[in-house]
Image (spheres, helix red, strand yellow):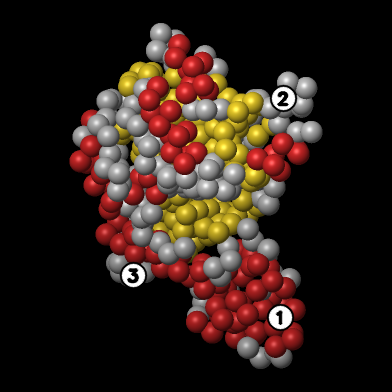
Amino acid sequence: MYFQNKMILSKYPLVVQKDILDHMNIIDLLLLSFVSKNMKKLVTLFQKKRSESIRSIEYEYDRTDESCLVYIPKESEPKSSKPSPETVECMLMRIVKRDIYHKDATSKTLEFRFGGEYEYPVVSYLECVKESVIQSIHNHFLDVFGNSVEYYWEGVGWQWPEECFIPFLPKLKNVTFCTGLFVDGHFAEVSNLENFFSSSPVTKIYQLHLLNNVKPLTPESKFYQAEAIHVNAPLHNCPDFLRHFQGKQFGLSCDSYEKSNLINFANRWKSGEAFQNLEYASVRITNDNDNQYLNSILNEIGAKFIDANRPLPKHTLRQRYDKNTTTHPIISRAYIVRESDSRVASVRVSMITFLFGVWDKTEEEFLKMVE
């Protein structure tokens, strides 16, 4: 059908071709772009404005059947939210492992099909070329939709019950990787964990669930280069993952955490020595016997306090490692000031949490805000 449409399209003036393409849905346009290089150029040329309206394209890889859903999320939905009828604007395709080796199929053959429950194309691949097939499809998307679209890959290294495995992370250009890991078994060996981080594409978001004790990572680990990190270690003492963090948002929930780690963190931020990119940090200590010291931290980091007769500011941000939520609000009179640029960070300490939120304001601007 699409070859026939191509022959018809080529006989019309460009203005008519554009009008025809403007009235086609995005799935038909995408399929048409696979017909030939000339057709891809035509679709790309005439549909540039439509492509510019697409905020992001998401890859959702399912380890259970080695399939990958590719979709455009709704504009109102946070990036990297799970695909569902409520969150998906358009399903572009599903990439699946080929079950049967056809005589007329080679490792470079891509099979496109419709049918059954799917209203979008299903592309099949041979296991030996899975990564190259996904790379080819992604490169095609880059040509058709351009670099202004944000591309996300969700790679998870766990499956219930708590089965740990290495997530599949293909090497793709201009893609934001979001990776989750259960840290247990062979991953609990810090050398294996380091090898995974060093060999993986640069990842924007890491979520770790520690099922075993882990030794500290090297300060140069790629893990610390992530934009957002969340570590959950409810039954274990946790290494000082915060010390070498270079990103924007950090979350930690653990059984116990050294008081000196939090004091060191706050003082290094104050001096401008580290954490220049930080927006928000949260540390939650689940062992009630180990967190009695938290209340004394404000004095030890030299916190200042807003006058009692002034309204309390509320610091909150869109959470980067769980984009369906916002950060836990920080409503506190306590704050500290960075020496290098007078930037302010609100600090809230309770019996179980240490919250730290950086404002895009100097101390003078911050105090005017709460007048």
- Kindly state the secondary structure of the residue where label 2 is placed: loop
Name the image quarter holding residue 3: bottom right
- Kindly state the secondary structure of the residue where label 1 is placed: helix
Nearest to the observer: residue 349 or residue 227: 349
Residue beneath disc 3 = 108
Nearest to the observer: residue 173 or residue 4: 173
Where residue 275 appears, as percent x and y from the top left, is 46, 44
Query: Which badge, 3 or 2, is on the more N-terminal residue?
Result: 3
- Nearer the viewer's eye, disc 1 or disc 2? 2
Query: Which residue is depicted at the point 59% across and 44% down?
Result: 342
Where residue 125 appears, as percent x and y from the top left, is 36, 60
Query: Which badge, 1 or 2, is on the more N-terminal residue?
Result: 1
Mark 3 residue type: Lys
**How far separated are the C-alphas under marks 3 and 1?**
32 Å
Classed neighbour count for the residue bearing mark 1: other residues with Cα under 10 Å, few (<14), some (14–19), many (≥20): some
- Nearer the viewer's eye, disc 3 or disc 2? 2
Q: Say whether residue 105 is left or right of residue 351.
A: left
Whether residue 132 is situated above or below residue 294 in the rendered picture: below
Classed neighbour count for the residue bearing mark 3: other residues with Cα under 10 Å, few (<14), some (14–19), many (≥20): few
Q: Say whether residue 260 is left or right of residue 84.
A: left
Mark 2 residue type: Asp
Whether residue 323 is situated above or below residue 213 in the rendered picture: below
Whether residue 236 is visible to the viewer of this picture, yes or no, is yes
Where residue 324 appears, as percent x and y from the top left, is 60, 38
- Nearer the viewer's eye, disc 3 or disc 1? 1
Tag of residue 18: 1
**How far separated are the C-alphas under marks 3 and 2?**
69 Å
Residue beneath disc 2 = 307
